[in-house]
Amino acid sequence: MNQISKKILFSRNEIQKRVKELASQISGDYAGRELVIIGILKGAFIFMADLVREINVPCKFDFVRVASYGASSESSGKVVMTKDIETSIKGRDILIVEDIVDTGLTLQYLVNWLKERSPNSLRICVFLDKRKRRKVTFEADYVGFTIDDGFVVGYGLDFDEQFRFFPDVYIIEQ
Ligand code: IMP
């Protein structure tokens, strides 16, 4: 990984196993209903693609794009929406899919934004939960893995737009 030192945190096999478990839980919870799954670009695209292919209830898809990090590993603390959904979600069952929740500011902003459009229900599925760094009270409904502090890349997660394509998840060593 160029000059950055890294250590594997979750292998592709561990990820695949956990994604199947999450999908099975979600399929059970939404049996007999239709979901609208909203992915948060760019980080969630790989997780979302794997997850939805294991879900066995009907799903429709949309995406939002929010930016909270620039070219650094520290959050700016400011969330900006750069692409909104294009689907009506009024009265629909919504599942937001995100790569990682850290301070919680991004998801808090998005949940408030989407709730104003009166969905029937709204739940959140995150691949990784960096629980210790929360700045706002926030709980995801479905969590792939809980991790400690530290910056992770791979499986959609980037550092300055690099490393998203890695099939495994790595922690960057300082
Ligand atoms: P939050 O608003 O602080 O919860 O941050 C959420 C966003 O920060 C995620 O969607 C990621 O884009 C980014 N992020 C937070 N921690 C990491 C990390 O360890 N690696 C890569 N991106 C991260």
Image: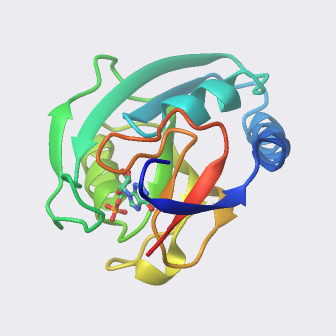
Is 57 rendered above or below residue 73?
above
Total labels: the figure holds 0
Q: Is residue 143 left or right of residue 105?
A: right
Is 34 rendered above or below residue 47?
above
Q: Is residue 153 left or right of residue 58?
A: left
Question: Residue 54: where, in percent of width, then height?
Answer: 78, 26
| Residue 54 showing in the rendered view | yes
Residue at 65% in and 58% down: 143
Residue at 36% in and 51% down: 159
Question: Residue 34: where, in percent of width, then height?
Answer: 63, 22
Q: Quadrant of residue 21?
A: top right
Q: Quadrant of ligand 1?
A: bottom left
Q: Is residue 120 left or right of residue 74?
A: right
Q: How is the image coloured?
A: rainbow
Question: Residue 91: where, in percent of width, then height?
Answer: 44, 29
Q: Quadrant of residue 48?
A: top right
| Residue 140 showing in the rendered view | no
Query: Residue placed farthest to the front in the image?
Result: 3
**Camera-nearest residue between 130 and 25:** 130
Question: Residue 86: where, in percent of width, then height?
Answer: 28, 17
Is 138 rendered above or below residue 119?
below
Is 50 rendered above or below residue 120?
above
**Camera-nearest residue between 104 and 32:** 104
Residue at 43% in and 76% down: 174
Residue at 25% in and 55% down: 109
